[in-house]
Amino acid sequence: MPERQRSERTHQPRRPAGALVLLPLALIAVITVADVLSPPDIHLGPLLVVAPAITAAFAGTRLTALISVLAVAALTVIGVMRDGLTTANHLTQIAALIVVSALVVVFCAVRGRHARELVQVRSVSEAAQRVLLRPLPARVAGLRIASVYLAAEAEAQIGGDLYAATRTATSTRLLVGDVRGKGLPSLSDAALLLGAFRAAAHLQTGLPELAAHLDASVSWDSAETESFITAVLLDIPDDGGEIQIVNCGHPSPLLLRDGRVRALDPSRPAPPLGLGALAAVPYQPDAFGFEPGDRLLIYTDGVIEARDSTRAFYPLTERITAWDGEQPAVLLDHLRTDLLAHAGGHLGDDAAIVAVERLPGA
């Protein structure tokens, strides 16, 4: 799982606190005493159904069933003490309480089963993420790297956005991409591209050749589905020279230097991977300076397309200047918190962000 990723966990229902358990017991006792002491024409016994209903809100099946049995027993005691269970009214009340309590217990059992299934789904999702989105190295060849992934699907830890890094003999190569669509259905295309990149990134001599290889891989598999992937490929040399970037229809990376932000726009944009053969446009790399102390921010469109309550997009370029001096991991932590706050805690699309810093003196 990526080092900077944080996600909520779904667990089995916890054991209720003692104070919560005392609440339905106290209700049963109070209602029973009040009913016994009330005039003959006042019947408070039906209120005992509140006890199992409240218990179901915080407890599991067993405790809810126990409270239900106690509620039925209490109503039986009320009937015995008032008229000896000889009236149809008390018998009907007891039967109704038994039926309602049984339904509450069944609801708890179904809810518990769904909770266990959700835990299994989360486990499978996390396993898939560990296989596909392997953690990027925190330090490699004079670079400091951090990443964060935010899935739009509520119960998924991974969707259609992706990133990967690999080493060549003289450089570090990065891939950040965004599959058409979002959520779990886009996993297949993401897995295909990541596998192709990891297999060929250290073999292809240049980024144009690597981009062509990845485009052919995606095109071969998506001939019938008509899917495509926007992506940006980076080659960062170890000797401190200019970095090479091939942008395939993806948002431009941002360069942070001395408190200023510059978008590394391509001089000749390439089509998304999977559409290269249709466009018949050769891939053209662009060279940019990347000096010690500089930071690169590579992201997917789920970041800049996040909207707030007024439908305004997230102003990424404006916000990141406030954290320009931070290390990549700290920068992404601030960015993640600010992005979720802007979007009201939930993104409409998957979002992946990778931050890279060239270390001084590397």
Image (spheres, rainbow, N blue to C red):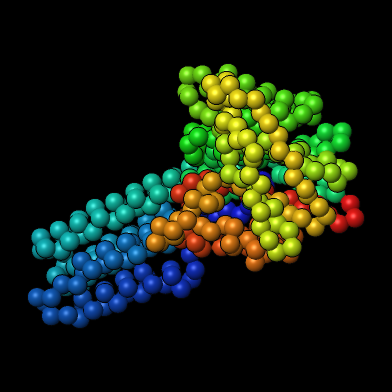
Residue 65 visible at all? yes
Compared across the picture, whether 314 is left or right of 5 comes to: left
| Above/below status of 27 relative to 63 | below
Picture coordinates of residue 168, whole percent (x, y): 83, 33
Along the line of sight, the residue nearer the viewer: 61 or 173? 173
Compared across the picture, whether 333 is left or right of 295 comes to: left
Quarter of the image for residue 71 reads: bottom left
Along the line of sight, the residue nearer the viewer: 38 or 220? 220
Quarter of the image for residue 214 reads: top right
| Above/below status of 138 relative to 247 | below
Along the line of sight, the residue nearer the viewer: 325 or 271? 271
Quarter of the image for residue 58 reads: bottom left
Picture residue at 86% right of the left edge, 46% below the top = 240
Picture residue at 21% right of the left edge, 76% below the top = 35
Residue 154 visible at all? no
Picture residue at 66% right of the left edge, 54% below the top = 262
Picture coordinates of residue 197, whole percent (x, y): 70, 30
Along the line of sight, the residue nearer the viewer: 227 or 58? 227
| Above/below status of 162 relative to 339 | above
Picture residue at 13% right of the left edge, 75% below the top = 42
Picture coordinates of residue 274, whole percent (x, y): 56, 25
Q: Residue furthest front?
A: 267
Picture coordinates of residue 88, whole percent (x, y): 10, 60
